[in-house]
């Protein structure tokens, strides 16, 4: 069976993947190449679940709310009390999913490949925090939302998962495919003062 090619919902709106889409004074927004993404659900109080997940990933998932862990090219973002978004290199979700299912056999869990569910954007630059603050209710000051922190929140009325990559600031944003074009257009307006 032929493999289907991924087509970004931003095709025709943004520059090609990995190329600067919006850039200006202290702000840069790009669409990242589609990463591997796995949604994992399980009991964080079950030591067998945590140990099995750590065996499959090579490191333990974070159990403190709104934090992340990373190693070996993979990141695990705490996304809910019993759930994590695992993000890694493009095209590697199938092998990682198999490793998780093997390590967690017989342990209550759900692991699903959601690689084509979301668009990954990276927003960085000195004014990135100001741009996000125009549509996001989170306190994004590095004292409140520091490098490594993540949160499901609302951005201009739409659900988004934000991961602080650094206090520089730089953020990864995971946005549902169907909302990507509308949010990209919002970003064009929100960054206008820095791009003009």
Image (cartoon, rainbow, N blue to C red):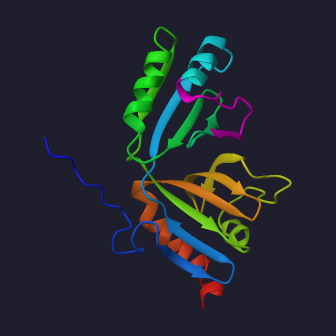
Please state which of residues 14 and 55 is positioned toward the viewer in this rendering.
55
Judged from this view, the residue extending furthest toward the left is 1
Q: Can you give x and y, in whole percent of width and height, for residue 43 in the image?
A: 61, 19
144 sits left or right of 76 in the view: right
Residue drawn 65% across the image and 66% down it: 135
Q: Residue furthest top?
A: 106
Does residue 83 lie above or below 22 as drawn? above
Is 79 rendered above or below residue 138?
above
In this figure, what is the number of numbered marks? 0
Taking the magenta stretch, the answer to whether it contains residue 57 is yes
- Looking at the image, which residue is at 25% across and 54% down? 5
| Quarter of the figure with residue 140 | bottom right
Q: Quadrant of residue 65?
A: top right
Q: Find residue 11 and report its horizontal and vertical position in percent.
A: 34, 69
> Which quarter of the figure is the C terminus placed in?
bottom right
Q: Is residue 109 magenta?
A: no
Give the residues drawn in magenta, as a range.
Answer: 56-70
From the viewer's perspective, is residue 44 above or below residue 114?
Answer: above
Residue 161 position, x and y percent, is 59, 49
- Residue 92, percent from left and from top: 41, 40
Which residue occupies 62% across, 39% down? 71
**Majority SS type along the magenta span:** loop
Q: Residue furthest bottom?
A: 196
**In this rendering, would 124 be left or right of 159?**
right
Quarter placement of the N terminus: top left
């Amino acid at each position: 069976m032929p493999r289907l090619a991924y087509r970004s919902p931003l095709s025709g709106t943004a520059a090609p993947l990995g190329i600067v889409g919006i850039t200006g004074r202290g702000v840069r927004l790009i669409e990242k190449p589609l990463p591997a993404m796995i949604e994992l659900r399980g009991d964080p109080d079950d030591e067998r679940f945590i140990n099995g997940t750590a065996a499959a990933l090579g490191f333990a998932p974070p159990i403190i709310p709104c934090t992340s862990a990373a190693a070996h090219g993979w990141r695990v973002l705490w996304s809910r009390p019993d759930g994590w978004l695992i993000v890694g290199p493009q095209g590697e979700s199938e092998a990682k999913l198999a490793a998780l299912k093997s390590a967690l056999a017989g342990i209550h869990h759900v692991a699903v490949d959601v690689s084509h569910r979301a668009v990954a954007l990276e927003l960085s630059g000195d004014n990135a925090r100001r741009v996000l603050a125009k549509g996001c209710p989170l306190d994004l000051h590095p004292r409140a939302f520091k490098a490594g922190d993540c949160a499901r929140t609302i951005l201009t009325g739409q659900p988004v998962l934000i991961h602080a990559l650094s206090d520089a600031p730089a953020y990864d944003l995971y946005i549902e495919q169907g909302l990507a074009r509308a949010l990209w257009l919002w970003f064009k307006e929100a960054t206008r003062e820095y791009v003009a």
